[in-house]
Image: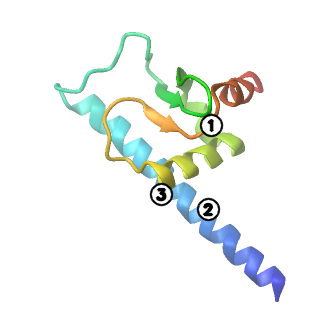
Amino acid sequence: MAKHSTGSKKKSRIVKLKIVVERLHRSLLLGRKSNSYYVPEDVKEGHFAVMAVGYEQPKRFVIPLSYLSHPRFLQLLEQAAEEYGFDHAGALTIPCRPCELERIVAER
């Protein structure tokens, strides 16, 4: 019985992750189509900006789209969706300490 519960939770998390990735993808595509959307010069094609907001000073990162398949980064996106939603302008806000995001980025 416990296995069924664990499997159900895992499926629920996968569905949530898919929703987060789809919304991020849609927001990135909308940014390209709109002339009023400003993309900073340091955000190259195939990248997106995130703000790591933890217990220390927030820090901005420019992350390659390939990180959308990194398991720990996907967990952070899920947490961001739960905490902040997608109704704000600017960089995506990630609920983690900047040093934690630096470790994730250094893994690749």
Q: Mark 3 or mark 2, which is nearer the start of the sequence?
A: 2
Q: Which of the image's four quarters has the C terminus?
A: top right
Q: How many marks?
A: 3
Which of 3/80 is in front?
Answer: 80
Give the SS element for disc 3: helix
Asked if 5 appears above or below 71 in the picture, the reply is: below
Q: Splitting the image into 4 quarters, where does residue 100 fall? A: top right
Which of 66/55 is in front?
Answer: 55
Asked if 29 appears above or below 46 in the picture, the reply is: below
Give the x, y percent position of residue 82.
50, 56
Q: Mark 3 or mark 1, which is nearer the start of the sequence?
A: 3
Disc 1/disc 2 C-alpha distance (Å)? 21 Å
Disc 2/disc 3 C-alpha distance (Å)? 9 Å
Asked if 23 appears above or below 97 in the picture, the reply is: below
Return the residue at label 1.
96
Return the residue at label 3.
19
Give the SS element for disc 1: loop
Disc 1/disc 3 C-alpha distance (Å)? 20 Å
